Image: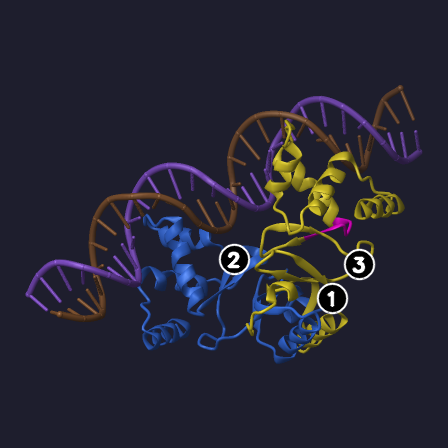
Chain colours: A yellow, B blue, C purple, D brown
Amino acid sequence: MAALMKAEILCRMAGKKLTNIRRRVLEAVWDSHAPIGAYDILAKLNDGGGRTAPIMVYRALEFLMDNGLVHRIASLNAFVGCAHPGDDHAAGFLICRECGSTAEMDSETLNEALDTAVAARGFVVDSQVVELRGLCPHCNEGHTHAR
Amino acid sequence: MAALMKAEILCRMAGKKLTNIRRRVLEAVWDSHAPIGAYDILAKLNDGGGRTAPIMVYRALEFLMDNGLVHRIASLNAFVGCAHPGDDHAAGFLICRECGSTAEMDSETLNEALDTAVAARGFVVDSQVVELRGLCPHCNEGHTHAR
DNA sequence: CGGATTAGTGTTATGTTATAACATATTTTC
DNA sequence: GAAAATATGTTATAACATAACACTAATCCG
């Protein structure tokens, strides 16, 4: 799997260890087509008789997030693989309410607009949560919903 | 309290009932200078011997959110009073990591940018979570942090 | 009016998400 | 190879949220 390979390389370059459990959690995240919850990851790991504890999953997720390999979707209490690992980027997400698919949006336009809106108020941003829920192009076929 | 008065009026106009528990939850939300968690609201209600149950608070919060009186901050699992009740608006939030104060950002610029970034991908947005964490102007005095 | 319907509240129990505290094992550093 | 740092394993519990069902109050409409 390409994402796994890339993760291996990035960790090696950064002097970080992509240990077994971390790799297995990352695999579980990528195996899911949609954002996946920590306890669903846990279930995958323990499928077939493992005895991994919740905190082990959370610790792995923390590592993966710190190293830009996974993002947390706060509005879903769930996690997705990062589409652009390596870049240190502020991302936004487009979450389809029908199919659950989640696209990472790394838009200049978006971040410039955020900066502008925010700078006007003298606020200094450290981190952002931008999660837009709606219909992806595929699920929107034949519909006529507007915002 | 002004927010309470406004809520009364808006509910009356909409034919909705701002019952006792709903009003008390709304009060608790406004009494807090920062976003407040459901169980902290609960504690306030029960301070002095009440026996309100968690679900009663969640039910009240659901009503208040449905009627545009309260917003949920997903990244904090907490709730804030809506700064512009009555408008049906898509808001964003600026959350100070030092003092916890939270400003509601109802920016045209922001929403236009979101629309632009999103329309380019053929995505149709229903609802949004925009929560920016950082330093408010007051807490930023004397600092030189950048994004 | 007064019965039927709807909306709201109260109560108990449980589900879901996340972390604390501490012991053990492994790796790195010097 | 001892000390320090990093990672894992184990048990328990904290924090956030909802299900299910009984009961009460408000409203609708003959």
Mark 3 near mark 2, Cβ–Cβ under 8 Å? no
**Mark 1 falls within which chain?**
B
The image quadrant that residue A91 belongs to is bottom right
Quick check: do tags 2 and 1 share a chain?
A: yes
For label 1, the residue is B143
**Chain part drawn in magenta:** A66-71
Determine if the magenta segment contains residue A69: yes
Indicate which label's residue lies in the foreground, 3 or 1.
Answer: 3
Determine if the magenta segment contains residue B32: no
The spot of residue B60 in percent (x, y) is: 38, 59
The spot of residue B57 in percent (x, y) is: 39, 55
Taking the spot 67% from the left edge, 50% from the top edge, the residue there is A33
Q: Earlier in the sequence, mark 2 or mark 1?
A: 2
Cα separation, mark 2 vs mark 1, equals 28 Å
For label 2, the residue is B78
| Type of amino acid under label 1 | His
The spot of residue A22 in percent (x, y) is: 74, 39
Cα separation, mark 3 vs mark 2, equals 28 Å
Taking the spot 34% from the left edge, 77% from the top edge, the residue there is B13
| Left/right of residue A61 with respect to residue C4 in the rendered view | right
Disc 3: CA contacts within 10 A as few (<14), some (14-19) or many (>=20): few
Picture disc at residue A88? 3
Quick check: do tags 3 and 2 share a chain?
A: no
| Left/right of residue A94 with respect to residue D27 in the rendered view | right
Q: Is residue A43 above or below residue B68?
A: above
